[in-house]
Amino acid sequence: MHVVLTREPGGTVRVHDGASRAVPDVDVPDVDLPDVDVPGADLPALVAAREPDQADGRVPRWTWDDTNRWYLGLLRAGVRVERSHDLRLVHRILRHSTATGGSELAAAPAGAWDAMPPTPAGAAPAVGVRRAPQGEALFDLAATALPAPPVRGADADALDPVAELRRQEDAVRGSTAPGRLRLLAAGESAGALVAAEMHHAGLPWRADVHDEILTEALGPRPPEGQRPERLEALAGRIRAALDAPPSLNPDSHPDLLKAMQYAGVGARSLRKWELSTIDHPVVAPLLEYKNLYRLLTANGWHWLDEWVTDGRFRTEYVVGGVVTGRWSSTGGGALQLPKAVRRAVVADPGWCLVVADVAQLEPRVLAGMAGDEAMATAGRAGDLYAGIVASGAVPTRELAKVGMLGAMYGGTTGASAQVLPRLGREYPRAIALVEEAARTGERGGVVTTWLGRSSPAPGSAWDEAQAGAFADDAGADAAARARSATRSWGRFTRNFVVQGTAAEWALCWLASIRRRLWALGVADGVRPGLAPAPFADRPHLAFFLHDEVVVHAPLELADVVAAEVRAAAEEAGRLLFGDFPVDFPLTVAAVDAYADAK
């Protein structure tokens, strides 16, 4: 049962009963019923009243143009929804998928839905609801850069959510893989709910512990505009080693490189690997300075002031922010939390952090996609790379890892190139899949993930490089540029199918964890945490990074939550690969501080 939300003039909620064509092969006549205007302030109450109504098995699917635009406002009012359909995210998938190439949605000229930017997590919630028709849920999971300003003016008039929903339904129903696309749309939309909920709940963060970490590493917090004492001391050692004047600023790369040239250091860059090969007194203090400077600028006191409030770190996750479907983030570097500051991620009193990560996700996904039973068997004991060694394909675990990463990322030199033929003999289906994806990319073609997300075309620069190689006056340089562009795009498509499908597995994992955690309810005697409603007294997802999750849970539920997270991984594998015997084992730990998980 779709409930489509749309903004109406005057801050009202408009409820309109229409018709849905969500049920395949069943023609449902359009129905026009009168619109009903409701004050926009009543939206949370309207949603809350509809959510528990599941006696007839029809759980509302809140269908909106953009999840952040609507759901964050509901969460602030303490209202959680079970299911949603994000029209913007699903439009982007269906627009470019090879499985929907013959649809009206794919063939239409670029329009308002293509130009629609994601809503920032801090934006004010929209109001307005249009209730679309009842019927079987279209996307039933169980069954199977900086945002631009909002779209305005004439383009906004083209953002008719009911019409867009029907175009999407038609595109999926007429596609070559309707079941997989339904699962992908459900997973992507559920991921948007998870991202909004993690932003709302926040990641527990002890500002006092973070300050202790910085003070231990850098010295006391300095006055504004001054270096911490540890960095200042290292700057003095750098100047002394280079016999440079007090005015030398180690933060200025051009000035520092020039001083190093005058001192005869011989470095052409400040990259760590190059500095490590140089024997000079400046190297040790400079490498230490670089490490501490990175901590100061990425997660220093200014970061703490800006991103941690009321004991919580809140970032803005961007669902599908990477072209493969992986997430990105736009604030606080959430996807790059260094180990140095993870000691500050501390559970609330009476609570714990259940940290889980899946071992070797991408090669396991590759085994499932390719139907390579030999590779699936190699991962059965837990460590897939050790299983590859046990199969006799390679002599050491390190070679197994290097070879598999080379197969998935296009390693063509060194140990990776030497190992790849052996892997190809032992696991022919898996290696053939990535090799074919690479050849498709080298021809300028498009590849598609297991559930239906397609890669972009190479683009004009690639086309120009290829055309230049065939020009009448083409020289050796033009041919070399064409070959380089060809290999580069082949490496991209080789990895796209694997990384993109791994992202799809992770979406299903997150959706299953989210549903399972909520079903646990509130345990007796739970001490409420500091997260806002509706998560103050319930376990909830607090952090996600590609193949790792952190659940903030009451201590009483730690073991139960760990079991549900493991069960969710098994469910994700079944959703994608059915009964194919590929395992997704997890390492799970219940800890007080994130740093203690590994």
Image (cartoon, rainbow, N blue to C red):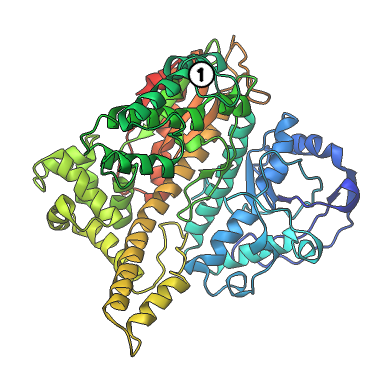
Check the picture and name the quadrant holding the C terminus.
top left
Residue 403: image location, x then y, percent: 19, 50
Residue 144: image location, x then y, percent: 48, 50
Please state the total of marks drawn on the protein image.
1
Residue 438: image location, x then y, percent: 30, 65
The answer to which quarter of the image holds residue 476 is: bottom left
Q: Is residue 488 left or right of residue 503?
A: left
471 in relation to 524, above or below: below
Task: Identify which residue, 163 or 574, lies in the foreground.
Answer: 163
Q: Is residue 4 left or right of residue 411?
A: right
480 in relation to 518, above or below: below
**Disc 1 secondary structure class:** helix
111 in relation to 279, above or below: below
Task: Identify which residue, 509 or 179, lies in the foreground.
Answer: 509
The answer to which quarter of the image holds residue 103 is: bottom right
Q: The residue under label 1 is which amino acid type?
A: His
358 in relation to 208, above or below: below
Residue at image position (51%, 18%) is 210
Task: Identify which residue, 313 or 387, lies in the foreground.
Answer: 313
Q: Residues within 10 Å of mark 1 (few under 14, many from 20)?
A: many
Residue at image position (47%, 73%) is 460
Residue 246: image location, x then y, percent: 44, 28
Please indicate, yes or no, whether residue 588 appears anywhere in the rendered image.
yes
Residue at image position (49%, 38%) is 510
Task: Identify which residue, 381 or 141, lies in the foreground.
Answer: 381
Where is mark 1, residue-wise?
A: 210
Q: Is residue 371 left or right of residue 560?
A: left
Please indicate, yes or no, whether residue 21 appears anywhere in the rendered image.
no
